[in-house]
Image (spheres, rainbow, N blue to C red):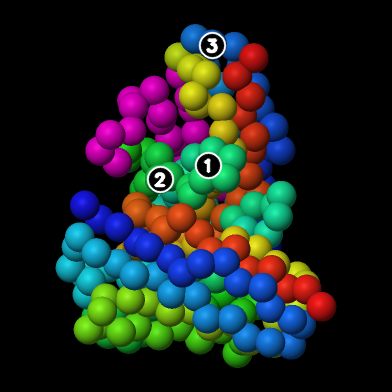
Amino acid sequence: QSALTQPPSASGSPGQSVTISCSGTSRDIGGYNYVSWYQQHPGKAPKLMVYEVSKRPSGVPDRFSGSKSGYTASLTVSGLQAEDEADYYCSSYAGSNKSLFGGGTKLTVL
Amino acid sequence: QVQLVQSGAEVKKPGASVKVSCKTSGYTFSSYVISWVRQAPGQGLEWMAWISPYSGATHYAQRFQGRVTMTIDTSTTTAYMELRNLTSDDTAVYYCARGGTGEYSTILDVWGRGTTVTVSS
């Protein structure tokens, strides 16, 4: 199966909001409410930021929010801060105990 | 605290095999699956497979089926991932991560620091 589709880059100024999209199909994002988002700083392991479309693990700021409409999931980062600059990856369940990742989006804080 | 500690970097020749370990601590080993995710240089994340320490069940991404074997040692709460018949395309950082089964396999809440595998002649 193909990876989920994310824009390669996104940017915003401190304090602004930015939304990153993640497009899939009826066999993954459109078929299940199991979309996760991960943040990865250079040279570091990924960190879970959102799961089950819109839930946040303990310790993740509420500036990070997730949503889904049809075959597209989105991650919105509000009140951008310098430390939010990182790569972001979406992930979706794809049936039959398999998962897919998106290609990743590099978020730049201007 | 919950920790996943991976083995050190490896350099292998094409055609060889590599076995990466993931030592867990701080939680009930049998309650979560261990997933393996890799990242080629400058590229995105790629889900490879997961194994359940509770049942021994495994699931693989289609492209790795037949070339990857995952095992667990419950006595040391360690998971292993062996990748065979290596090519230069397998050069990547390999991560283990704690997750769930089925739909919950997308929820990887604790990650190891990664093991760099370099395949070069």
| A74 falls in the magenta region | yes
- Same-subunit check for callouts 3 and 2: yes
Q: Which numbered mark, 2 or 1, is in the foreground of this view?
A: 1
Q: Is residue B15 left or right of residue B75?
A: right
Mark 3 is surrounded, within 10 Å at the Cα level, by few (under 14), some (14 to 19) or many (20 or more) other residues, namely some
According to the picture, the residue beneath numbered tag 2 turns out to be A48
Sequence order check, earlier mark of 3 and 2: 3
Q: Compared with residue A67, is residue A83 higher up or lower down, i.e. above or below?
A: above
Q: For mark 1, what is the residue?
A: A40
Q: Do the dots labelled 2 and 1 sit on one chain?
A: yes
CA distance for labels 2 and 1 = 9 Å
Q: Which stretch did the figure color magenta?
A: A57-78
* Whether residue A10 is situated above or below residue B36 in the rendered picture: above
User: Is residue B102 in view from this perspective?
Assistant: no
Placement of the C terminus of chain B among the 4 image quadrants: bottom right
- Give the left or right position of residue A1, taking residue A94 as reference: right
**Could you tell me the amino acid type at mark 2?**
Leu
Q: Which residue is mark 3?
A: A14
Is label 3 on the same chain as label 1?
Answer: yes
Q: Secondary structure at mark 1?
A: strand
Q: On the image, which quarter does residue B56 sit in?
A: bottom left
Q: Chain of mark 3?
A: A
Where is residue B47? Give x, y as percent: 54, 65
Q: Chain of mark 1?
A: A
Against A55, is B12 above or below? below
**SS for callout 2:** strand
Tell me the kind of residue under disc 3.
Pro
